[in-house]
Image (spheres, helix red, strand yellow):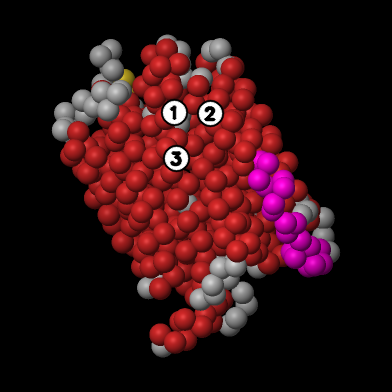
Amino acid sequence: MKNNMKKKVKIFTGYQIFVITILAFLQFTVILDFMVISPLGAQLLQELNITTAQFGYVVSAYAFSAGISGLLTAGFADRFDRKKLLMVFYYGFIIGTFLCSIAPDYHLLLIARIITGIFGGVLNSIIFAIITDLFQVEVRGRVMGFVQMAFSSSQVFGIPLGLYLSNHYGWHSPFTLIVAVGVIAGLGIRIYLKPIRDHLKSEYEHSAFTHLRKTISQLPYLQAFGTTTLIATGGFMLMPFASAFTVHNMGISMHQLPFVYMVTGIVSMVSGPIIGRYSDVIGKYKIFILGTLLSIVMVIILSHMGITSLWLVILINVLLFTGITSRIISGSALMTAVPDIKDRGAFMGVNASVQQISGGIASAIAGLIVIQTVGGKLEKYDTLGYVVAVTMLVTLGMMYFVNKYVTLKLAVKKI
């Protein structure tokens, strides 16, 4: 049995290692662009003199524009060289982030986030399609483990540095940092990434819009999209107000906040590849179950906490993000195995759109539920905790059917 497993797992080539590295680096900039909004929440609420509802709109504006853009491009995603598609949307993402770095007020920041979302929201689906094209399903957990290290890296390097810059040079400076790093990633893609065209060998008998319609009408795909909807709902509801809750409710200062994110991120960086490896070895759905159960417990505890010591805050966040990372890595690896080769780009595009749109709705709703008092303290954050816990629990059942479909598909060697 062990010998068979060793034969199935392929050793990565030098070029594949480069692809994993450059995609992870690209993901780092995209994720940081989104995640930096959350820790900047406390500062933006004060400096822009906006309400929690308006801040929720800033978060959801990116998500809605990303979702709409993803749907509009999904039908065309399988008809172009994936490298060219990646470059076009990444350059647009950099331009949108630059506009965020010079936005003088709330309304222009809102517009800049919409532009960033139009381009940035599609990138995740293109990255997943590239991973699916270049790597066998048996090693995709490991690939996802490394690529999703971008999520942790943004906490270790990006968010603490972003918070440091914002505390000393204003809230615009983190976006300027992202633009600078993004230019480097863009050059790496342009110079070293090879064209990715194998999917173009498939024959398309219908128009792009017909292709999109057929993609969203298949039951297994719909099950996957529904699962993604609930996964996104939980994260987008809780995280946008996490920094404000940590500062005003748990008593952590703005200067201590970067340290919380840094330690949490370091643990996630170390655990990510390990989680990815075990998801390939013992089963992606099993890891998803464990990650979900851990996340539910930590969400309930975190959302009910009051004034807390720094180290206990760090411990709770470390456990929570370990659970979230397990869900992201195992769930993403399972999703890549759902579509057929001719539908990969369209499926990933729709899946990303569903994620962004549902997340945008969740952020907007969260902004209406959470209330900030005159002193800055957030109320009804515990209500969000219960909602997130329930959605996480429901996703366990929905992911079961996704896993069942993938297992049967692999059994008949269709991928």
Residue 413: % across, % down: 60, 81
Task: Residue 154: give its label.
Answer: 3
Q: CA distance from mark 3 to mark 1?
A: 9 Å
In reply to whether residue 194 is colored magenta, the answer given is yes
Residue 367 visible in the displayed image: no
* Mark positioned earlier in the residue sequence (3 or 2): 3
The one of 129 and 303 positioned closer to us in this rendering: 129
Category of crowding for the residue at label 3, using alpha-carbon neighbours closer than 10 angstroms: few (below 14), some (14–19), many (at least 20)? many
Residue 295: % across, % down: 30, 51
Residue 400: % across, % down: 42, 66
Q: Secondary structure at mark 3?
A: helix
Is 182 drawn above or below residue 353 in the view shown? above
Name which residue type carries label 2. Answer: Leu
Name which residue type carries label 3. Answer: Ser
Q: Which residue corresponds to the image point at 44% horizontal and 54% vertical from the top-left?
A: 328
Q: Secondary structure at mark 1?
A: helix
Task: Residue 162: give its label.
Answer: 1
Task: Residue 413: give its label.
Answer: none
Q: Residue 258's image quarter?
A: top left
Q: Secondary structure at mark 2?
A: helix
Residue identified by numbered label 2? 177
